[in-house]
Image: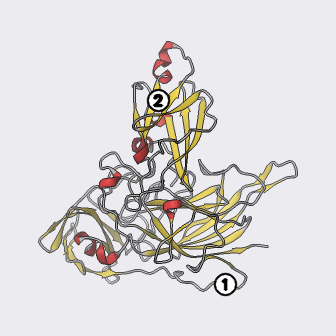
């Protein structure tokens, strides 16, 4: 996920002495590659002028359980910050603006904020990342996991998603016509209250061995079925379904380059981390050795299960960077209303109309067709890049224009560049990755 967003400041920064500056006036992005922490900060002063600050420093390896990071005591801060200066604090990193401003802009020339070192990788305002449970094995995922999932009845033309929120709390959504990508009418969602970037409202509770749903529809879920009635009194019974992406395990086509099949990491730069199950984990990030121009890419991924998360800043998070420039977001977006930061978005540019995210701990697929931007001999861009994205077999982005690099991605140029699996918070796992270059 591109953490360079307007509300992302909540996750990593405690504002100090800046009452006159709105949260929307600052954007921060962090990434970790091979124990190197990179921070990019963009601020807007009172005249809406942009001021950038960048630094890098050494960090200890991500914690194997909680995937947080700590600054090394000996870490040296490097980078060009201009008038914005980074400094080490007992909490992590500080950022200060050294310029002089008129008195009406006085709050801007003090300490801007503190970036907590333990929060840089994955954090949230309500619960510290280290306190949250993280699961990667469906057989050992806690009591609530058995209820989380999808339920449907083709005859009733109704689908439902149940999202576990931890400690016996749940969120539910009903879909008119069927599940997203499988009958849903594309507009009607029955819910008690919509989710947002910062809220995931609960409307169901575990009582005994069943989940009691109390929203517009009233129902009971036992983990195998949901029985209840609509607001008009019509009764329904939805059976649990386990959807599988039609492209999961797709055979590698002739002429394709296998980037990862579990046998080796020869196609990846040093630092890639492989689990005992022979999956690449996003914990360390992964960048291909080869550089690509136009291509079709197949990626299979599984999102960790973290039921206690409430905001997008806390959820398992990664991204597929095309040419290290353009991010297709990966985020635990199951059972929430599709938003501009959710799974499948062309980050900071295009939001799909449908949320095709399956439940955590389910293998999912991206099939991406990418055409790079074109340039003239003077290096001027003459044609925008374009991409089509199929998420779990459903086209969610259809030949959309790519207007520029994702914030935090490398600068656009005529040159080919690597593919990058983003390190950003709690882990995403990858397998069966291949690419077909267009000639």
Is residue 329 something one can see in this rendering?
no
Q: Which residue is at 33% across, 57% downward?
A: 309
**201 to 23, vertically: above or below:** below
Is residue 378 something one can see in this rendering?
yes
Q: Which percent across, then down, holds residue 293?
A: 74, 64
Precedes in sequence: disc 2 or disc 1: 2
* Spatial separation of the CA atoms under disc 2 and disc 1: 52 Å
- Viewer-nearest residue: 404 or 285: 285
Q: Residue 253 carries which label?
A: 1
Q: Which residue is at 71% across, 60% downward?
A: 417
Q: Which percent across, then down, holds residue 80?
A: 64, 35
Return the residue at label 2. 112
Is residue 226 toward the left or the right of residue 26 in the image?
left
Quarter of the view holding residue 134: bottom left
- Viewer-nearest residue: 227 or 208: 208
Q: Which residue is at 32% across, 51% downward?
A: 199
Q: Which residue is at 40% across, 45% downward?
A: 11
Is residue 275 toward the left or the right of residue 290 in the image?
left
Look at the numbered disc 2 and give the secondary structure of its residue: strand
Neighbour tally class for label 1: few under 14, some 14-19, many 20 plus, Cα within 10 Å: few
């Amino acid at each position: 996920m591109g953490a360079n967003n307007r509300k992302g400041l909540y996750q990593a920064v405690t504002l100090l002495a800046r009452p006159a500056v709105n949260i929307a006036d600052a954007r921060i992005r962090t990434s970790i590659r091979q124990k190197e922490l990179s921070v990019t900060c963009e601020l807007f002063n009172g005249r809406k002028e942009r001021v950038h600050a960048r630094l890098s420093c050494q960090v200890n390896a991500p914690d194997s359980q909680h995937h947080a990071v700590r600054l090394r005591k000996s870490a040296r801060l490097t980078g060009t910050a201009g008038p914005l200066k980074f400094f080490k604090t007992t909490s992590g990193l500080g950022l200060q603006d050294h310029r002089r401003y008129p008195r009406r802009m006085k709050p801007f020339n003090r300490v801007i904020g503190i970036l907590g070192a333990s929060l840089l990788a994955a954090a949230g305002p309500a619960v510290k990342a280290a306190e949250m449970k993280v699961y990667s094995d469906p057989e050992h995922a806690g009591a609530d996991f058995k209820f989380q999932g999808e339920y449907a009845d083709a005859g009733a033309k109704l689908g439902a998603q149940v999202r576990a929120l931890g400690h016996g709390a749940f969120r539910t959504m009903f879909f008119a016509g069927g599940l997203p990508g499988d009958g849903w009418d594309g507009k009607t969602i029955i819910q008690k209250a919509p989710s947002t970037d910062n809220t995931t409202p609960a409307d169901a509770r575990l009582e005994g061995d069943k989940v009691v749903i109390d929203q517009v529809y009233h129902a009971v879920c036992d983990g195998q079925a949901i029985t209840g009635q609509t607001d008009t009194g019509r009764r329904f019974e939805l059976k649990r379904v386990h959807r599988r992406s039609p492209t999961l395990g797709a055979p590698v086509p002739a002429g394709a380059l296998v980037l990862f099949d579990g046998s080796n990491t020869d196609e990846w730069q040093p630092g890639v981390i492989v689990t005992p199950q022979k999956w690449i984990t996003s914990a360390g990030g992964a960048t291909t050795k080869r550089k690509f121009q136009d291509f079709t890419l197949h990626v299979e991924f599984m999102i960790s299960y973290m039921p206690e998360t409430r905001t997008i800043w806390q959820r398992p998070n990664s991204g597929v960077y095309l040419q290290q420039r353009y991010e297709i977001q990966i985020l635990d977006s199951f059972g929430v209303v599709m938003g501009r930061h959710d799974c499948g978005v062309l980050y900071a540019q295009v939001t799909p109309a449908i949320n095709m995210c399956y439940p955590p701990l389910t293998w999912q697929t991206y099939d991406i067709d990418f055409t790079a931007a074109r340039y003239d001999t003077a290096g001027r861009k003459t044609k925008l890049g374009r991409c089509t994205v199929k998420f779990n077999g459903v086209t969610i982005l259809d030949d959309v224009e790519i207007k520029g690099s994702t914030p935090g991605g490398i600068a656009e140029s005529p040159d080919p560049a690597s593919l990058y699996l983003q390190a950003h918070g709690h882990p995403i796992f990858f397998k069966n990755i291949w690419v077909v270059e267009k000639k």
